């Protein structure tokens, strides 16, 4: 596990969260580092066997087209029998796999691949008081997960999975913001029979935890500290949990901070927006709309419009984006993102590139009717307006549009099938400059199997 790999750095940042007071080096106490004093304090003579959970971030390189739900469930299903390499000991375990709300970043050296970020709640009955046991359990789960991922999705050494243990506070924040939680299933969906009395004892402890409020919070948020409490299928998190991202009535985006459940604003420092708890945010800037994925119906409508546009698909999408930002430019809105289409993840490179291309390329194409399909543009504008102006939820625009366009490109023959001649590379007569073509491809093909051309 290379110490300086990009995957390791991203895992450390996920463990660190938005709390920049928590030093990078503290967050990087990983499998090759130190264990906290609470984990090493031990009585090596006769450690008791107890049921506990140890959380860690698991980062792995996988194909960009991989379904997140399927990956989480498949990985959870592998983590049922652990083998310790140093001692050859074998023991039973169970796992909750939480899909973290961060975007999966493209791997620049591995076209068509992304770095998947997952939270693993690793359950086991172990002598946890034994020196080094917490670290060893994480290593056992990591070894099992790594072996399976590399068998399924082999990559060069630089893309190998990494693991990053988490403190309980950060783990709870990530769990509460989760969109997908998968549990060990199949023939191992049920807990081992020997765990039953330990689960009963653990629940009794939690019932008396009023004098230990932190422990009580753990019990409430991690399925009563009982693995597989909600069964073995991947599913979305409870609606009672705080959403990771919301958009307020001013089209200002907010994201959940780690640990304390408060929210920070995108670009909040330059706008003078302070950190707020959810109740205050709702009272002063509501109604709030959670940022959610697009519906299957909307995805199908966008893809059908792009397929129908054929080689004018790229031009049609850019013209649609131009019309959307042009409408906002004349609306006289105050506060929030510059344009409504940015509010779901303002500051991301996709949002910035999307708006820049809308003004620089889409505006030019809008004057050339032969370069776009009007029917496709109408559908795209209608769908995106529903995403940003719906009464209950907000759908992030830039990354979702790029993902749908990339899927159509993969399915129909690549860039030559979705862009007209002036947008093809190397067109010396009547074509766009190379840097323009590259910029358009960099955004629209960012989620294709092979990456941008």
Image (tube, grey):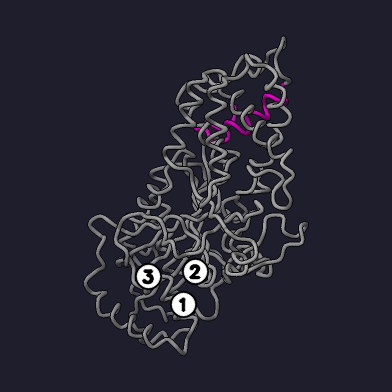
- Asked whether 15 falls inside the magenta stretch, the response is no
Earlier sequence position, callout 2 versus callout 3: 2
Q: Write down the residue under mark 3.
A: 223
Examine the structure image and report whether residue 448 is included in the region drawn in magenta.
yes
Report the front residue among 400 and 382.
Answer: 382
Q: Where is residue 128 in the image (x, y as percent from the top left)?
A: 40, 78
Position of residue 204 in the picture relative to residue 192 (left or right): right
- Find the distance from the CA under tag 3 to the CA under tag 1: 11 Å
Contact, mark 3 vs mark 1 (Cβ under 8 Å): no
Secondary structure beneath label 2: helix
Circles 2 and 1: CB distance less than 8 Å?
A: yes
Q: Give the range drawn in magenta.
A: 434-453
Residue 217 badge: 1
Question: Residue 434: where, in percent of width, then height?
Answer: 71, 22
- Mark 2 to mark 3 CA distance (whole Å): 11 Å
Q: Where is residue 220 in the image (x, y as percent from the top left)?
A: 42, 74
Picture coordinates of residue 203, whole percent (x, y) = 33, 81
As rendered, which of 330 and 428 lies closer to the eye?
330
Q: How crowded is mark 2: few (under 14 residues within 10 Å), some or many (20 or more)?
A: many
Marks 3 and 1, the one that precedes in the sequence: 1
Labels 2 and 1: the sequence-earlier one: 2
Mark identifier at residue 172: 2
Q: Residue furthest top?
A: 429
């Amino acid at each position: 596990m290379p110490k300086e790999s990009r995957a390791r750095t991203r895992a450390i940042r996920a463990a660190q969260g938005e709390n920049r007071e928590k030093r990078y080096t503290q967050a990087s106490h990983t499998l090759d580092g130190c264990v906290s004093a609470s984990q090493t304090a031990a009585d090596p003579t006769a450690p008791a066997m107890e049921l506990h959970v140890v959380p860690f971030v698991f980062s792995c390189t996988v194909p960009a087209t991989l379904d997140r739900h399927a990956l989480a469930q498949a990985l959870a299903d592998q983590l049922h029998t652990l083998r310790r390499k140093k001692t050859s000991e074998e023991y039973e375990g169970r796992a909750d796999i939480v899909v973290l709300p961060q975007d999966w970043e493209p791997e620049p050296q591995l076209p068509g691949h992304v770095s998947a970020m997952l939270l693993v709640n690793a359950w086991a009955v172990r002598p946890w008081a034994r020196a080094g046991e917490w670290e060893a359990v994480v290593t056992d789960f990591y070894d099992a997960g790594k072996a399976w991922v590399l068998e399924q999705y082999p990559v060069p050494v630089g893309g190998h999975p990494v693991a990053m243990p988490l403190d309980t506070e950060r783990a709870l924040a990530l769990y509460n913001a989760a969109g997908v939680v998968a549990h060990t299933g199949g023939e191992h969906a049920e807990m081992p029979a020997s765990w039953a009395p330990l689960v009963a004892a653990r629940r009794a402890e939690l019932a008396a935890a009023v004098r230990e409020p932190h422990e009580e919070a753990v019990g409430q948020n991690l399925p009563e500290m009982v693995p597989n409490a909600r069964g073995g299928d991947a599913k979305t998190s409870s609606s009672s949990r705080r959403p990771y991202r919301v958009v307020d009535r001013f089209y200002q985006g907010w994201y959940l901070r780690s640990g304390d459940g408060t929210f920070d604003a995108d670009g909040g420092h330059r706008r003078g927006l302070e950190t707020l708890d959810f109740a205050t945010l709702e009272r002063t800037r509501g109604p709030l709309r959670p940022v959610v994925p697009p519906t299957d119906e909307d995805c199908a409508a966008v893809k059908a419009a792009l397929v129908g546009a054929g080689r004018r698909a790229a031009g049609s999408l850019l013209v649609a984006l131009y019309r959307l930002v042009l409408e906002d430019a004349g609306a006289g809105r105050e506060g929030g993102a510059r344009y409504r289409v940015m509010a779901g993840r303002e500051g991301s490179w996709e949002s910035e590139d999307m708006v820049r291309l809308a003004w620089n390329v889409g505006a030019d194409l809008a004057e050339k009717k032969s370069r776009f399909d009007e029917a496709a543009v109408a559908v795209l504008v209608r769908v995106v307006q529903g995403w940003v102006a719906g009464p209950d939820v907000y759908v992030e625009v830039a990354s979702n549009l790029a993902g749908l366009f990339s899927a159509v490109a993969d399915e129909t023959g690549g860039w030559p099938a979705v862009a007209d001649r002036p947008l093809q590379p190397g067109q010396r007569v009547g074509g766009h400059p190379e840097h323009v073509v590259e910029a358009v491809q960099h955004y629209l093909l960012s989620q294709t199997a092979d990456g941008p051309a």
